[in-house]
């Protein structure tokens, strides 16, 4: 039984450290991905076979300690590092980086689903909406789409900027702007109490409900208000992957995989010797 146990324990190590290498490989592959958050595998032991249960002491006997043998390792989860990556200047006024807490909320115009993202490489589409690279519309603090306002009569739009508070400021050729007008819109930010509940959908998009169908938007706040970060126009958040740590973790995972492979090999060798006892 012990030989079979060592074989099984070694196999659980191979399976678990293989997953660990997958996580590390994904981190390294996304070292240059905008706003990517690195992850780390968390380990826990399997259940243990009980050879002897513990017993309390009596008047005539001493207490008996439990005797248990573990059955290997398994992963308990994948922990994501949500610390902010560095902000890199791009020179594009529609590139929006978040300094601090918060996510942009973008909404698909086709199916109505909304997603959280920190990837802020936006653009103005032909209809005047601020959209992501996938064409999803950025939401303002009211949950509406951010859209350019019509210019005054006999004027046209000259330029657009977004300040640290998320206000979309339009400058017109007649020298006016919309800073004091009713059409001023503010890019909203959303925060989540449990970021670990966000489900990665690829392209830097996260769904934020268990069912996977967005029915209620999270509370949107004004950038710069308490609990929310500020918006830094002309920047994009970089990946927070630390290559030095990832390479060190990769070496550890590789050696651990090799050690467990050795356990499997030795267990197989011992089993082979037992099978051949009669022949000798």
Image (spheres, rainbow, N blue to C red):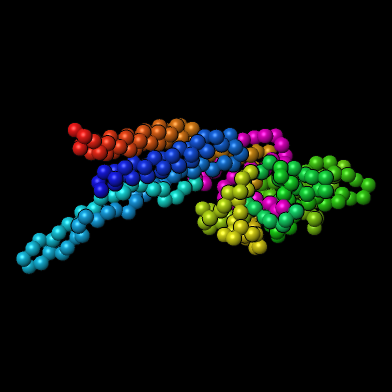
Q: Quadrant of residue 4?
A: top left
Which region shows up in magenta?
A: 81-109
- Residue 107 is covered by the magenta coloring: yes
The reply to whether residue 94 is in sight is: yes
Q: Quadrant of the C terminus?
A: top left
Percent position (x, y) of residue 270?
25, 37
Side (left or right) of 240 relative to 267: right
- The residue at 90%/45% (across/down) is 155
In this view, the residue farthest toward the right is: 154
- The residue at 26%/43% (across/down) is 3
The reply to whether residue 226 is in sight is: no
In this view, the residue farthest toward the bottom is: 59
- The residue at 66%/43% (across/down) is 120
In this view, the residue farthest toward the left is: 60
Q: Nearer the viewer, residue 58 or 187?
A: 58
- The residue at 63%/39% (across/down) is 236
**Principal secondary structure, stretch drawn in magenta:** loop
Side (left or right) of 27 relative to 68: right
- Residue 154 is covered by the magenta coloring: no
Percent position (x, y) of residue 208?
59, 56
Q: Nearer the viewer, residue 199 or 274?
A: 274
Percent position (x, y) of residue 54?
19, 60
Side (left or right) of 131 relative to 88: right
Q: Nearer the viewer, residue 44 or 83?
A: 44
Percent position (x, y) of residue 229?
59, 49
| Callout count | 0
């Amino acid at each position: 039984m012990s030989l079979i146990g060592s074989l099984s324990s070694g196999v659980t190590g191979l399976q678990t450290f293989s997953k660990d290498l997958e996580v590390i490989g994904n981190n390294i592959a996304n070292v240059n991905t905008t706003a990517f958050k690195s992850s780390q595998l968390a380990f826990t032991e399997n259940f243990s076979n009980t050879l002897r249960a513990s017993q309390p002491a009596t008047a005539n006997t001493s207490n008996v300690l439990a005797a248990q043998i573990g059955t290997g390792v398994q992963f308990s989860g994948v922990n994501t590092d949500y610390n902010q990556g560095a902000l890199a200047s791009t020179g594009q006024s529609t590139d929006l980086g978040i300094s601090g807490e918060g996510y942009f909320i973008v909404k698909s115009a086709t199916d109505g689903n909304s997603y959280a993202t920190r990837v802020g490489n936006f653009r103005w589409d032909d209809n005047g909406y601020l959209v992501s690279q996938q064409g999803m519309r950025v939401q303002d603090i009211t949950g509406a789409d951010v859209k350019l306002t019509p210019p005054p009569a006999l004027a046209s739009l000259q330029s657009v900027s977004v300040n640290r508070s998320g206000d979309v400021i339009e400058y017109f050729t007649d020298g006016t702007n919309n800073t004091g007008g009713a059409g001023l819109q503010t890019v909203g930010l959303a925060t989540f109490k449990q970021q670990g509940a966000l489900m990665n959908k690829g392209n830097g998009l996260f769904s934020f409900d268990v069912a996977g169908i967005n029915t209620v938007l999270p509370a949107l706040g004004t950038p710069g208000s308490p609990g929310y970060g500020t918006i830094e126009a002309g920047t994009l958040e970089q990946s927070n992957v630390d290559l030095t740590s990832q390479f060190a973790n990769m070496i550890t995972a590789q050696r651990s995989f090799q050690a467990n492979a050795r356990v499997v090999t030795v267990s197989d060798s011992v089993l082979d010797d037992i099978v051949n006892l009669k022949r000798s």
